[in-house]
Amino acid sequence: MNQGFVKAAAATPDIRVADVKYNTEKICEAIEAAAGEKAKIVVFPELCVTGYTCGDLFTQDVLLRDARAALLKIADFTADKDILAFVGVPLSVDGELYNVAAALNRGEILGLTTKTFLPNYAEFYEMRQFTPGPEKAREILFEGKRVPFGPQILFQASSMEELIVSAEICEDVWSPIPPSIQAAMEGATVIVNCSASDETIGKDRYRRELIAGQSARLIAGYVYANAGEGESTTDLVFGGHNLITENGAVLSEAKRFRNDIIYSEIDIYRLLGERRKNTTFKTSEDRKLIRVPFYIEREKTVLTRHFPKQPFVPANEEERARRCEEILTIQAMGLKKRIAHTHAKSAVVGISGGLDSTLALIVTARAFEMLGRDKKDITAVTMPCFGTTDRTYQNACKMAVQLGAELMEVRIADAVSVHFRDIGHDPGDHSVTYENSQARERTQVLMDIANERGGMVIGTGDMSELALGWATYNGDHMSMYGVNASVPKTLVRHLVKYAADVTPDEQLKAVLYDVLDTPVSPELLPPKDGNIAQKTEDLVGPYELHDFFLYYMVRFGYEPSKIFRLAEETFEGSYDKAAILKWLEIFCRRFFSQQFKRSCLPDGPKVGTVALSPRGDWRMPSDACAAVWLNDLEQIALAD
């Protein structure tokens, strides 16, 4: 919980219609089970104390009296439980019957949230028995104590003030203006819903999209507990379709037609970070809703939710292919517009036989197809030098030919050697000067060819390199339009693979697959026995780790210690704790020290939710200090 994770549960107990004693026992058993799993919030279905399908039995005093007594018994059962429970119950107040979600904590009834919108159509006829809740919450006398009663009551954890929970009931979320909107605007970070939504053809999909969509609209967690087996089947069947969602993502979903408890952890700090960034999400300055404190112990939350190793890459193959096609189209459309606007006669791409330049050339070819232009106007330039291997050289040449571009070869070794002589650099000194001189010579060649041909240089560098500053300033760092600027390295590989999979050209397919099989390298140091001597990931670290760090730091603003914890669990068996800590520290140091390279980036299209453009998503001073972030990491080492 120190890092914002709060475990929640949605429970559908076995019930019997109108058998209050039996239902109470089952609800208490579920609370016991949820507390045993360290859930801090547990939500039960609508009217589960009696059953939702009691019909006109709700007019019987004996049922209502038993339900009231059962609520007290369930509340008392929570006395020694570290949990906030929401239980659906019918409640008579001032001669009117209300559909209520009771909030229970530490043996107390904290509040009674009323249902605002009563369905009275098709199979629903709640207005026959129930009265809509009042417009505003007030206090009522309940068993000798004053208890908040009404809609949109906010329950705030005293041990974690950012955890603010509000309830609504079933139809409320299906209405045009759900009560949860105002609750979220006044600070609620988690919405719970006690529901009884029956099953009809296709309704589960609509329900899932509705609950996920509401959590996205409110930038909140949403815990939805639905009625299940045990309700009357006179006319309806209830499937126990429980859902836990967070800002549009489904974290956990119950299998329908099986009563069960589902769990997941809602990241409260992530939600607050999203709200801070989203200027259209306006919290209400004029607070009108009642706030009720509750207590749960603050302790480490054991995570059960899944964090993908490659957050930029969809795990589902079909979705991944769709995403790749969309990204390639965005990249090509951006370049198409720039070429048309500048009246460029040609596009110049430096090709190395590596992944990034391969993707840039593929995108450029697509843009020319969109423009209806001859791809011979694309100049693919290979510039062999001291570190170039035959494998990458041959792949670069074959790829250019197969894509229909004009292949141009400029050997730069002599020019770089003259440059070494001019600045007095020993060619045997393979330091950063040795490497960067080659990168800058290549950029100069590309720029001059573009000038000569009335064209523009297409940048090849990707977002992962920009995050780490793994680019030569005014070398491969510079271009006239950077098509890969917001594409992370882990995604570059899948884009190239997708292009290989869909091309009907078998020769091009073979070349692209060999590029995919080639180690990532800038090839600036001489080969060893004809093979690549300089492997980027040996020097700067695994890109799958760096992309993981980048995603959670920039997208959600996670602190390094939280990123470390997620990485340790996600990459268990792949990297040990020491390796993750080492590369995370390097990531933090380089991310801060290399901002000056990102502050003067060429234009390039944004393709995803994370981007580092200094004109858009990421505006950071070039001389910002990393001390706070590094200190957070040091605490991990000290803890050992």
Image (spheres, grey):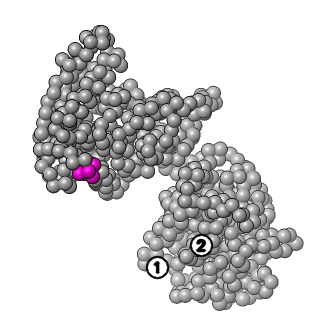
Report if residue 545 lies within the magenta region: no
Q: Tell whether 631 sits left or right of 345.
A: right
Verify CB contact (< 8 Å) between mark 2 and mark 1: no
- Quarter of image, res 32: bottom right
Q: Quadrant of the C terminus?
A: top right
How crowded pointer 1 is (Cα within 10 Å; few <14, some 14-19, many 20+) is rated as few
> Under tag 1, what secondary structure?
loop
Q: Quadrant of residue 386?
A: top left
In the rendered image, residue 272, in percent from the top left (x then y), is placed at: 60, 52
Q: Is residue 283 left or right of residue 320?
A: right
Magenta stretch, residue numbers: 337-341
Q: Is residue 179 above or below residue 595?
A: below
**Which is more N-terminal, label 1 or label 2?**
2
Magenta stretch: dominant secondary structure: helix
The residue carrying mark 1 is 200
Q: Looking at the image, is mark 2 or mark 1 nearer the viewer?
A: 2
Q: In this rendering, is residue 303 above or below 588?
A: below
* Residue at position x 17%, y 44% in the image: 345
In the foreground, 523 or 579: 523
Residue 489 place in picture, x, y as percent: 35, 40
Q: Residue 447, image x and y in percent?
A: 24, 33
Residue 338 in magenta stretch? yes
Cα distance between the residues tagged 2 and 1: 23 Å
Amino acid type, residue under disc 1 in the picture: Thr
Q: Is residue 315 above or below residue 92?
A: above
Q: Is residue 48 left or right of residue 173?
A: right
Left or right: residue 592 compared with residue 310: right
Can you identify the residue that label 2 sits on?
A: 178
Residue lying furthest right in this view?
A: 144
